[in-house]
Image (cartoon, grey):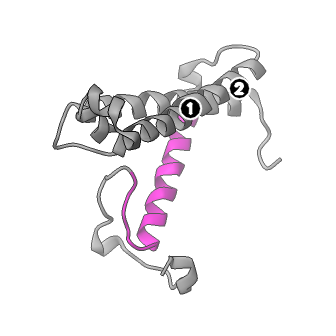
Amino acid sequence: AMVALTDRVLCVCLVVQCVIVSVFWGGILAASCSSAVTFAPMDRHLHLGASHLATSPAARRCLAHEVASHFVAQGALVGCIWWRLERWPSLSDALPDVAAALGIYAGATLGASMCVAPHELPYNLGAVPLRLRCELPFPSWLRGR
């Protein structure tokens, strides 16, 4: 293994998974209340109401995808980690490591967006400013063109 699965690493993974689920669904619900703010297709479907969600095949597929990926899969991972841990993690102990993990993720995401066209950030956060772009000379088959 590249990283030993110590209790410290597992605690960080557990907290990060809980943060992802909470922030994602909180953001979906908040964005669904606004027609001006959107960051995922799911919030646009929810904004159109329960009848749209019940009658639209695309909305039901989107809901199934989000529930499977941002709830069931991550919930199962939390369950597996919790089963392996001997005690529930202390949030204050895990917080610096969680911040570091999220910082590394944000840095990697920003770095990839800076180097790979179309330079868009995920979740409709916008594009990387022009002065920060440094597109790498990828072959055309890797750029999807």
Q: Is residue 49 above or below residue 130?
A: above
Q: Residue at x 46, y 40 (%)?
A: 61
Q: Residue at coordinates 40% horizontally, 54% vertically from top-left? A: 122
Residue 13 seen: yes
Q: Residue furthest front?
A: 55
The percent coordinates of residue 132 (x first, y second) are 34, 71
Query: What is the total number of numbered labels drawn onto the structure image?
Result: 2
Q: Is 104 one of the magenta-colored residues?
A: yes
Query: As shown in the figure, which amino acid type bears the numbered disc 1?
Result: Gln
Residues in magenta?
Answer: 97-122
- Kindly check if marks 2 and 1 are in contact, taking CB atoms under 8 A apart as contact: yes
- Check disc 2 and report its element: helix, strand or loop: helix
Instruction: From the viewer's perspective, tell me whether residue 138 is left or right of residue 135.
Output: right
Q: Which mark is residue 17?
A: 1
Q: In front here: 47 or 110?
A: 47
Three-letter code, disc 2? Ile
Identify the element where label 1 is drawn.
Answer: helix
* Relative image position of residue 117 (x, y in whole percent): 41, 74
Q: Is residue 122 left or right of residue 35?
A: right
User: Which quadrant of the view contains residue 32?
Assistant: top left
Majority secondary structure of magenta residues: helix
Tell me if residue 133 comes above or below residue 9 in the rendering: below
Dot 1 crowding, Cα within 10 Å, few <14, some 14–19, many 20+? some
Task: List the residue tagged with mark 2.
Answer: 81
Residue 26 on the magenta segment = no
Task: Residue 80 in the image: state x and y as whole percent.
Answer: 72, 25
Instruction: Say whether residue 12 is visible.
Output: no
Residue at figure coordinates x 43%, y 41% from the top left: 62
Residue at image coords 71%, 26%? 81
Is residue 92 or residue 69 the one in the foreground? 69
Q: CA distance from mark 2 to mark 1?
A: 10 Å
In this view of the protein, which residue sits in the foreground, 75 or 132?
75
